Image (cartoon, grey):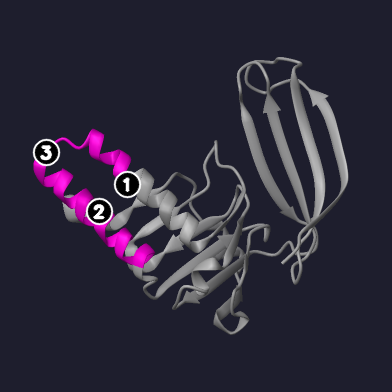
């Protein structure tokens, strides 16, 4: 799969954090096979190191939910395009990545996102206040390892109130596309990564 980029543009602006003029915005249009054009936006401040990435789907704007049913190693290569306003849910492991004030857009595959969640879960060990809490987090990390190492069946849900996020499936037959109602779109939360399974087990 080859991604083409064109209409590259760079400009200098003031940083929204430190107001420095040493801030560059890079914009480009990305053509991904079997997927609509994406506008990629990147802002980087050389002084305070503030950065922000995002994607905007140039052809689809309605609220959307994608569900991919991963069953094997090939399915774990399925690419997720997550815009800053997108929500990612793994129901089987109780993990959710929700948009927040500092959320950024990214492209990653299912395995890569699970590795990222594992890293953040492991980081929580340092903040654990009891042996019981540490044990629950270790069990959660082991659960993630089993999915990553054995490519266990797992669903990934991507929701976006503006239709900017998407899934590029390894197997199109395993992808569901569902248009959300306005009421459903308005109920999408904002926040950060939540480990529901680990949290529920500790409480």
Query: Where does label 1 land, which residue?
Result: 121
Asked if the stretch drawn in magenta spans residue 146, the answer is yes
CB-based contact (under 8 Å), mark 2 and mark 3:
no
Q: Mark 2 packing: few (<14 Cα in 10 Å), some, or many (20+)?
A: many
Rendering coords of residue 159 (x, y %): 56, 62
Near-viewer residue (181 or 123): 123
Find numbered disc 1 in the image and state the secondary structure of the residue it sits on: helix
Spatial CA distance of label 2 from label 3 is: 14 Å
Q: On the image, which quarter does residue 12 sit in?
A: top right
Find numbered disc 3 in the image and state the secondary structure of the residue it sits on: loop
Spatial CA distance of label 3 from label 1 is: 16 Å
Query: Where does label 2 land, which residue?
Result: 198
Spatial CA distance of label 2 from label 1 is: 9 Å
Q: On the image, which quarter does residue 192 sit in?
A: top left
For residue 89, side relative to residue 31 (left or right) = left
Query: Where does label 3 land, which residue?
Result: 130
Mark closer to the chain start, 3 or 1: 1
Q: Mark 3 packing: few (<14 Cα in 10 Å), some, or many (20+)?
A: few
At 71% from the left and 67% from the top, the residue drawn is 1
For residue 41, side relative to residue 51 (left or right) = right
CB-based contact (under 8 Å), mark 2 and mark 1:
yes
Indicate whether 23 appears above or below 91: above
Q: Give the range drawn in magenta.
A: 121-149
Q: How many labels does the image show?
A: 3
Near-viewer residue (195 or 118): 118
Mark closer to the chain start, 2 or 1: 1
């Amino acid at each position: 799969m080859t991604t083409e980029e064109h209409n590259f543009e760079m400009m200098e602006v003031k940083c929204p954090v430190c107001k420095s003029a040493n801030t560059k915005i890079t914009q480009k249009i990305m053509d991904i096979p079997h997927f609509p054009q994406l506008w990629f936006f990147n802002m980087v401040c050389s002084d305070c190191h503030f950065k922000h990435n995002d994607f905007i789907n140039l052809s689809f704007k309605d609220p959307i939910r994608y569900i991919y049913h991963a069953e094997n190693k090939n399915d774990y290569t399925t690419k997720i395009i997550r815009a800053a306003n997108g929500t990612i849910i793994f129901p089987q492991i109780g993990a959710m990545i929700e948009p927040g004030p500092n959320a950024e857009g990214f492209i990653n595959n299912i395995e890569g996102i699970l590795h990222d969640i594992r890293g953040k879960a492991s980081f929580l060990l340092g903040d654990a206040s009891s042996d019981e809490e540490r044990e629950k987090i270790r069990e959660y990390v082991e659960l993630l390892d089993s999915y990553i190492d054995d490519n266990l069946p797992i669903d990934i849900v991507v929701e976006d109130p503006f239709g900017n996020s998407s899934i590029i499936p390894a197997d199109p037959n395993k992808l569901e596309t569902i248009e959300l109602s306005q009421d459903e779109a308005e109920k999408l939360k904002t926040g950060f990564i939540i480990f529901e399974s680990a949290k529920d087990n500790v409480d």
